[in-house]
Structures are given as structure tokens and as C-alpha cells.
Amino acid sequence: MATYQAAYEILAEQLAENGVDVEAVKAALKRQHIETPSWGYANSGTRFKAFAWPGAATTTQQKLDDAAMVHKMTGIAPTVAVHIPWDKPADDDYDAMGQYAEAQGIRIGAVNPNVFQDDEYKLGSLGNPDPGVQERALDHIIECCEIMRKVDSDILSLWFADGTNYAGQDSLRARKLRFERGLEAVKAQLPDGGRMLIEYKFFEPTFYSTDVPDWGTAYAWAVKLGDSAQVLVDLGHHAQGVNIEQIVTFLLDEGKLGGFHFNNRKYADDDLIVGSTNPYELFLIYNELAGAEMSDDPTLSGAARNVAYMIDQCHNIEGKMAPMILSVLNCQEAYAKALVVPRGQLAELQQAGEVLLAHKLVTDAFRTDVRPLLATVREEMGVPVDPIAAYRASGYEAKIRGERGVASASGGFQ
């Protein structure tokens, strides 16, 4: 403990000399909020195989138990997203679900409809040429709006697998118009203060056309729909080399950045642990977010503080709990590094056209060892200084393995 305290004092002095308000940085880190997904605690895998993990959650109650453990270890993961019908209670008692979550020290977060899994959605959901299938998808999404009210959620997270595999399969314009009608109908059913986050994906599972293929499409619809609609950015849903931080900046400035699904990828939508493949990209994204939070423009800073940060990953071979904890910690570390960028110095260098020095200032922040800072923050928050080590020593993994065993399927809240 003395080692990291001494290192923290040295780091704090260096940051102060660069004009960084260390106490403000610590306060921001204590306010950080990363939402974990219920489905991340269950058995999931690639499109080809899901490897069953001993102790993986099979009910929503177990998923909430696991999410509560992640929050206990990190102190910054107080909500868990649910997926309907994967987390649907047998008796539709969503009040009980919310109460159970609160009893574990967490809350229900975003509600995610599922309009891609059933056979009826083979040709799409809201974009389907069959009006009956469109109606079924819309009814389910509206059901999720009602669930939002029951669990006190203010976010409806929308992802659609809709698209076509072949030229001529369907009218691309007709599919666009069907979506616009459907989303307008959803908007009318959102609870007061609720917002829909429109996610995009440039390919997969369809390969000729995707109905929500990019951030521009999601943004255009969010503009049409008004204040209750924003864009959700999944880090794996872009072509290689896309500058995601530039997209983030544009959407922030327009007030249309609703949230993130954090993960990482090497090639496409790999759903790997966030920060595992490209930590510099994660830092650069957080650099734009942190800069907006600290802006003198109240509209921009307010928009930045309203962004929802959510994990969306597939832990197939590395376990469930420890990878989720590491995911949260990687977001915490990237945010800390972004917070220690000397904003005043950076602005001066940018204005003066000092290309190399401005770049070096940002990369120096990325290379800063913020572990002593994070250890200090965690100690002040009353959570483990080393969350991974604390989890491994807690006995929780052995407990859930013994109680749950190995199961290949998961069910709703029980």
C-alpha cells in the first residue's frame, strides 16, 4: 500500500505542475458509470460455437447476482442492461426483478428488445416486407417501452439485424420508409424522459444491404425523431480504419451521442474485451469525451455527461466474471488517462499549430501510469485496490461453480 501511495504523491505533483486539477480528476473517476449486460454473464459465443462455462448464469436472478459482484469489486458498475425475452420473468413480475436488483445494490439499466432471433424475422423486423411481421416486431418493442416503466429505465437500446443478402431481394427505399414509420410509432410509446438509442452495424448478418448500416443513417433518423432519439456507437460496428473518435465528436457536438456498447475487435464485430486489442483507440475516444465534459460550453458538457456507457461483449473462452471486471477497469483506466490530458496546454499548442508537440502531449497522457491514481480512488471509494485479485480471493467463482454447475442454456428471471 505504501508503494502506490508514494507513487500517487509523485504523480499528483507532476499533474498539478501541468495544470491538472487532481481532485477534480478523482471526483470525475468516482462518478464514472459503466453498465454491464445481463447476457455477458451467461453462456455465449461466436456464431459457430458457445463453450459452456462452469458457473455461468442461467437465470436473470443469477445474472443480477453476478452484476452486483462486479459492482462490489469496482464501485462504478451500478446498473445492468436486460434483454427481452432472454430476461423475461415467467409471471411478468418486473417489479420483483427491479426489487431484487436493488436488494443486491444495483439497478436495471437499458432495456434491449430482441427482434432478430425468431424465425419470423428471417427477412427482417421493422423492415420486413410482411406487414404482419412488422406489426409483431413493433408490438414487442412497445412491450419493452412498458417494461422500461416497470423497472424505472430511461433507455431503450435498439439493434436490428434487418437487411438483404441479394440485389433485387427487396426495395431498399421501401425498407427505409418502413423503418421510419416503425421508429416514429416507438417514439410515441416511450416513457416520459425516456430515450431510444439507435445502434448501427455496417454488415452482418446480412451482406448485400443493412437497413441501419452506419452512424449517418442512425443520426438522420435521430434528427427526424427529435430529442428522444440518439445514436448508439458499438466499437465493433465499423469498417477497418474508421476514426471512431471523430464520429463521437460530431455526434457529441450535435447532441446526438446517446451511448456506447464497449468492446474491442481485431477484424470485425469480434466482441472482445474492451481495450484488449487497441487501448490507444479507447483512450482517444475517451479523450474526446473527457474534453467535452470539461468544456466551458454548458450544452456540450451537458451532452457529454448524458452519454450512457455500456459493455456489450462475448466472453467465450475466458470465463465470465473476471473478464467483465477487467472490461470495466479498462474503461476506468482509459478515462483516467483522458482526464489527465493538460487541456489548457493542448489548446495553446493546437492554436499555435504546434503539430508535433500537441500530438506528443496527448500521447504522453496515454503513456502515463495512472495505476497509483486509480488505487487511491478505489481506496477512497471503499472498493478493492486490485479488483481482479480481490475477486479471485473472494471465493465467488468457486461458489457459483459449485451451485450452478455447467449449463448450455439460460432462462428468464426466476
Image: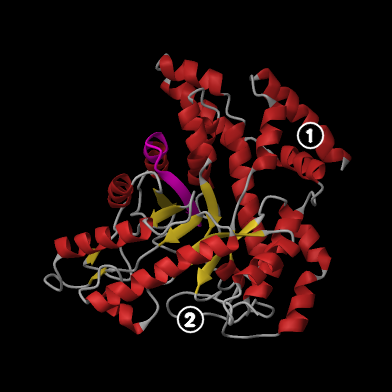
Nearest the viewer among 395 and 369 is 395
Residue stretch rendered in magenta on the structure: 250-264
**239 relative to 177 in the view: left or right:** right
Of residues 148 and 378, the one drawn nearer to the viewer in this rendering = 148
Q: Nearer the viewer, mark 2 or mark 1?
A: 2
How packed mark 2 is, by other alpha carbons closer than 10 Å (few <14, some 14-19, many 20 or more), is: few
Quadrant of the rendering where the C terminus is positioned? bottom right
Confirm whether the magenta stretch covers residue 11. no
Q: Is residue 372 visible?
A: yes
Q: Amino acid at mark 1?
A: Ala
Instruction: Assess disc 1: are there few (<14), some (14-19) or many (≥20) residues with their C-alpha within 10 Å of its C-alpha.
Output: some
What is the quadrant of residue 79 in the picture? bottom right
Disc 2 designates what residue?
A: 49
Viewer-side residue, 94 vs 310: 94
Q: Position of residue 261 (x, y in %)?
A: 49, 55
Quadrant of the snapshot with the N terminus: top right
Q: Relative to 86, is 252 on the left or the right? A: left
Q: Which residue is at the front of the view, 105 or 381?
A: 105
Q: Quadrant of residue 325?
A: bottom right
Give the SS element for disc 2. Answer: loop
Residue 407, how many percent across, how many down? Answer: 62, 86
Residue that extends furthest to the left in the rendered view of this protein: 168
Across and down, in percent, residue 49 comes to 48, 81
> In the shown orientation, is residue 329 left or right of residue 203?
right
**2 over 340 or under it: above or below:** below
Is-magenta flag for residue 256? yes
Tell me the residue that label 1 is attached to.
7
